[in-house]
Each structure stands twice: as structure tokens, then as C-alpha cells.
Image (cartoon, rainbow, N blue to C red):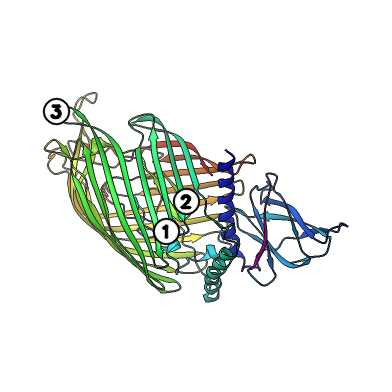
Amino acid sequence: MVSSVLQIKNFTKLTLVVLTAFFAVFVGASEVPGKVIVVEKNANLGVIKGVVRDDAGNSIADAYVSIFRVGTSNLLKQVRSASDGSFLAKILPGTYTVLAVAQGFNPVTISTVEVGRSAELVYGFKLERSGGGNTLPEKRVDRNNPKWVIRAAQSRRSIYQNTEGDTPTGKNESNENTVAQTDSIEESVESADEEISKRRSQSVVETYFASSDDGNFVGLNFATLQPISENAEIIFAGQSGTSQSAPQRFETTFKFRPNENHQIHLKGAAAKLGKVETSDAEQSLGQVSFQALDEWKMQSGVILVFGFDYSKFVGAGNDFSISPRFGLQFDVDSKTRFRTAYTTATEERNWATVAELEDTSVLFRGPVSVQEFVVENDKPQMQKNSRLEFGIERVLDNKSSIEANIFFDAVSGRGVGLTSLPFNSINGENFADFVANQQGSAQGVRIVYSRRLSSRFSTSAGYAFGNGQKLSAEVVSNPANIFENDFFQTFYGQFDADLKTGTQVKTIFRLSPQATIFAIDPFAGRMAIYDPSLSVMVTQSLPNLGLPIRAQAMIDARNLFDYQTGAGGEEGSLRLNSQRRILRGGILVRF
């Protein structure tokens, strides 16, 4: 137990040392007034002590207070705050820069502190939660470091690393040079204090309750990152639950960096999807998958991603898919970025939660409906969807950016669960559920505008249009004609709030005027929620009770008004069964 606690403390120390070094150059950050008390002592050392609090006045445990030589990034001493936020550091007389930082908060710097012999200085630090866009690193994308710019594509996320709807921007060229300078500072601090910066493991555990039309269940998600060396780590992640509706999945990811220009990703996963009814009997269906990727920084501002994906059904089916994966990102200048990517999808992945472990995202996925798989020759078929896209992103100013993408989708073997509702039905006797096999293609354009309104609020809006497939109005009278090609358009609006109380609110509204059926969402890789109508996600930070953990409660309501996509004709109507309302509530703990 003691060893485990020490590992947790050492990992926290590692993270905060890196943050400390990263922000050391910003000595112009907000200064805090300090009350100075001179106390006679027998020793020749001076004392710097005080309390670290958040902007609501609550004490912050495990914050790091670092002392630097004035005008340099030379870390001389670093101490950690106690459970009540207090800290104390003894140091030789001199003039120093003092910086306080904690996970989830922006750093605060006192640029000049004069420490006399046998003197005791008392300071109170008030930290503001990060994400408000008030620091230089939050105002731009580090376009020269692959770990910040690009990541292996995973469920419904871009092949590049992007936070949904957030694009940090830069003010001018001097800001970019200042941020880039921190890379060398990080390296010098890490080499000078190797033991402090030694990487430690990090874990996330989430337990939740979910309620939907498919039933209620309790689920458990977990992920652990274990560093193997400074250039390699392994990640274990899993999902389980109390019923067949709960996701059942386990995956392992191995990442290593053979040199500064390459980062290799190897990932294997196994999932239990559920039971499929065949002519023989009800059989279990599972899926195994493997992915290999290389992120290659070809030169400054140019990054290439290439690799392949392999998936195969086991149990009730034996269908498989193997396909390449490709991405290219090019920075035209400090405010303009071009990118192109080819990605594939073999399963519906409306993920529910993303856990960030260092620079890796672990996706905890939602339930899979095996009833919507296409069955041919008594075997379930794997959907094989792909997208080729070209896009450009432009930073407009410190607070806003715009992005435009052209995409080309190919759809094969995608099962779409539908309910037929004839008008001549009495008490629902003639209602019928069936699965349609969606085949074909789609092409379109999407435009997304994002803007940060203040340090607490941000918003984004998107519009997409093109040619795709929709439900046919004649499907009730002619079941063979389920889909038809037509023009589509869809809108979304998103509003995010990060309140002083530790509450974060994400609100998204989707609107598609026609009964369009998207095999791959037009905004895939850009948003966090793809459900129709109104969806709201609320997270609340919880007190850590003096423990070296971070906890938050979550309420997630998807498709709050239970809107169903459908089409109607003279003889009846048709309704889409997927993306119905689902309510989730849970607690996530990070340690």
C-alpha cells in the first residue's frame, strides 16, 4: 500500500515538474501580492511558505511550488503542498522567481522574490482553472511537436489529435517563438533532475449507471498507463457491466519512440458484442482487432501517419476487414494548416467517455446493438465504411478559427435497424422491426466556426451539405426501396461552460431537416456527441479529501427529447431505431 501511494505521488511530481518547466519562461504571468514576515532564526537559510488555493478559495493539495534563479529556467527547489494547501521551502539567501502550478490549473508566477538570511516570507497563491485561454500555450497549437499535433485515429475522432471544437490560437509570431523555446527548457530541467522527472503510472476508473430503451445496466471502465522507459509505455483498458447491454471490451496499446521523428502505435483489442440468432441457435458474437501506425515527423510542420487496421468476427461470424490508414498534415504558415486523411470504420462507435493519459486518449465506447448487424447466409457481416477527406484550418484571431473539409464516403454492409408503422395497423399488431443493408456512397462539405467568448465560455457552430442517402418515402409500399440518394444538409451548435465551482457543461444541438442516414457523421473527428436533437453533458469536480486523486461526477443525457429520424408515405411511416435517448450518470476517479 505504501509503495502504491509513493508511485502515485511520484507520478504527480513528474507531471507537475514538466508543467513547471513549460511555464517557467512566462515570468510575466499574473503576479500575486505576498505578505512578508521577518523572523529571527539561528540558521542561515531563508524560508518561503504559504497556501495554494483555487479561485473559489478552496485549498489545493499536491500543487507544486518551484523556485528558479531569476531570468533563467534553472530549477533550484521544488516542494509540494499538503492536504490543506500549505507549503514550505528553505533556500539560501538570494533573488528568485517563484512559480505555483497544479494539475488542471494555470500557473501563477512571482517574478522577483528577495530572500534574506534567516527571513521567512509568506505568500498566498490563487490559481485559475486551465482551459480559459489565458496562457500562451492555450492560445496556439504547438505545431512542431507530434505528441500535441497528431494521434492515431480512433472511434469517430479525426486521425489528428484535436479537442472537439477547441482550437488554441496564437497572437503573433513572437508568442510562437516563446512557446517553442520551452521545449529546450523542458529538456534541460529533466536532465538536471532526472529522478524527479521519472515517469510513473497513471490510472482512471469510472463507474456509471445507464438507462435506455434497450434496458438499464451498471458499467465499469478502467485504463492504466504504465511507462516502460522514457520512450515507451503500455496502456491497458477495459469495459464491463452487469448485463448484455453493457460494453464488454479489453484492449492493450503499446507506444514507443525510436527517435525524435517517429512514434509507433501497436494496439490489440477483443470485444464481446452479444448474441446473434441464427437458424441453428443463438450464438455469441465477438470481435478482435489490431492496429499498427507510425507517426512520422518528416520535417518541421509536416507530419505523416501511415499504417493498417485489421478486424475479424469470432464465434457466430467469421467476416473480416483489413484496410490501410493514412494521414498527412502540413502547416502552410503559423495560422494555416492543411490536412488529408483516409480512415475506415468497421463498427458503430458512439463513444461515451474519453480518458486522457499523458498524450494518449482512451475511448470508453457505448453499447453495440448486434440486432442491427446484416446477416447473410446465416452469418453476421462486418460493416466496411471508409472516408477520404481534405481540409484546411485557419486561425482568425486569438479567440476564433474556421475549418473547411471535403469528404468522400464509401458504405458497405452497414446494418440499419428500422421499424415499419403501417397506418392500417390496429394496436400496433402490424408493426415490424427489420434490418436494412446500407450500401453506396456520400460526398459533402463541412464548415465549422469556433470562438472562445471568455475565459469561462466558448461556442462553435457547423454546417454540412452534400449528396447522401435518406429513407425513402415509398419504403412501406415498396420494402425493396429503403434508401434513395438525395441532397442533405445538417447543422449543429455547441456551447461549453467551465464555471468557477468546478462545473463543466457541454450542450450540443443537432438538426437534419431530412431523414438522412449517415454511415459516417459529417462532423466525425470534430465533435464529442453525434446524437440528434439536444444533448447535455455535465461534469462536477469532487473534493479529494486530502488524497492524491482527482474525482468528478458526470451526468450525460443524449438525445434528450428522444427524437427519431423517420420518413412517411401514404401507407405508413418508417422510424430509425438507433440513437434513441440514453441517460448516464457516474463517477470518474483519476490517480
Residue 202 falls left or right of residue 445: right
Question: Where's the C terminus, which quadrant?
Answer: top right
Q: Residue at x 64, y 52 (%)?
A: 63
Q: Eyeballing the image, is 341 above or below 239?
A: below
Coordinates of residue 405 in the picture (x, y in percent): 33, 63
Q: Which residue is mark 3?
A: 280
SS label for mark 3: loop
- Principal secondary structure, stretch drawn in magenta: strand
Give x and y (percent) for residue 296: 36, 66
Q: How many marks?
A: 3
Q: Quadrant of residue 137?
A: bottom right
Mark 3 residue crowding within 10 angstroms, few (<14) / some (14–19) / many (20+): few
Q: Which residue is mark 1?
A: 162
Q: Secondary structure at mark 2?
A: strand
516 vs 180, left or right, is left
- For badge 2, the amino acid type reads Leu
User: Relative to residue 333, is residue 540 drawn left or right?
Assistant: right
Range drawn in magenta? 74-82
Q: Earlier in the sequence, mark 2 or mark 1?
A: 1
- Name the amino acid, label 3: Asp
Q: Is residue 191 above or below residue 561?
A: below
Nearest to N terminus: mark 2 or mark 3: 3
